[in-house]
Amino acid sequence: MTRRSGLLRILFVAVFLLLNFAGELPAADESIVRKSAVQIMRDYFTEQKYDEALAASAAALEEQPDSYLIHNMLAYIHWQRAEWDKMLASAEKALKIKDKDAEMLLLAGRARYMKKEYASAAETLENAFIAGEGTNIRNPEICFDLAAAYVQLNQYEKAIEWAQKAVSLDPGFATAHYVLGRTYFEAGKFAESVPNFLKSLELKESLTGVREYLGLAYAKSGDREKARQTFQEILKNDPDNKTAKENLAALQ
């Protein structure tokens, strides 16, 4: 057999196999080619495209109606959109799947707080703290959310206790020091609030609202000069700050 005839024979066999057995080749796995609805939603969520993730959620729920992940993402999306009823509903659906999940208990507690259901919020947040113990799942945040709830309930000793716990769990967390300062302030313990406001500014100078409360705390604890200096500093950086102007005028 010549080399040419051998090549022709190989080509003939290849064409024969292609024509006769092409229909028996395994089809490509569509799950490899096409993303699932849940994965599409998750991709949008990861990219912080919350409107797109929300739009994709209907198909994702049709695909996996009892998915913890979907309800978890929906709770966060509604949190971003300030939709408290929907946020709570999504968190509760996630909790039916994982009933002692600290993350979802925290979001459910926050939703109840925003709905002004402060007693229910405090109970839910305490459950979140218990569920999160030993895991470090947002525990400082759970603590200062609890402090805020107890302030609304006028239970200042409990509020101070939880705010102190937030600081002890994360001493470098500026917001925790601010919350402790606010808790002392709301309880009428103005002198105790001052060092916490100062510490929060030391850790994060740009923290919103701290200087205003620091000035008020100085004024209410009798240190009018430091109060004036604080309000003047606010006006130096923000000349149109109406609240600072009014507070400074009240000290004249």
Image (cartoon, grey):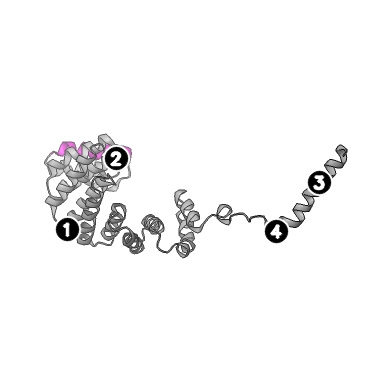
Asked if the stretch drawn in magenta spans residue 184, the answer is no
Q: Amino acid at mark 2?
A: Leu
Task: Report the disc number at residue 153.
Answer: 1
**Quarter of the figure with the N terminus:** top right
- Residue 227 in view, yes or no: no
Residue 71 image point, x, y percent: 38, 59
The residue labelled by disc 3 is 11
Looking at the rendered structure, the secondary structure element under dot 1 is loop
Q: Could you tell me the amino acid type at mark 3?
A: Leu
Q: Measure the C-alpha gap from mark 2 to mark 3.
A: 87 Å
| Residue 176 x/y as whole percent | 24, 43
What is the chief secondary structure element of the magenta stretch?
helix
Please give left or right for residue 236 compared with residue 150 in the image: right
Q: Say whether residue 204 is left or right of residue 32.
A: left
Q: In front: 225, or 154?
A: 154
Front position among marks 1 and 4: 4
Query: How far separated are the C-alphas under marks 2 and 1?
Result: 34 Å
172 or 92: which is nearer to us? 92
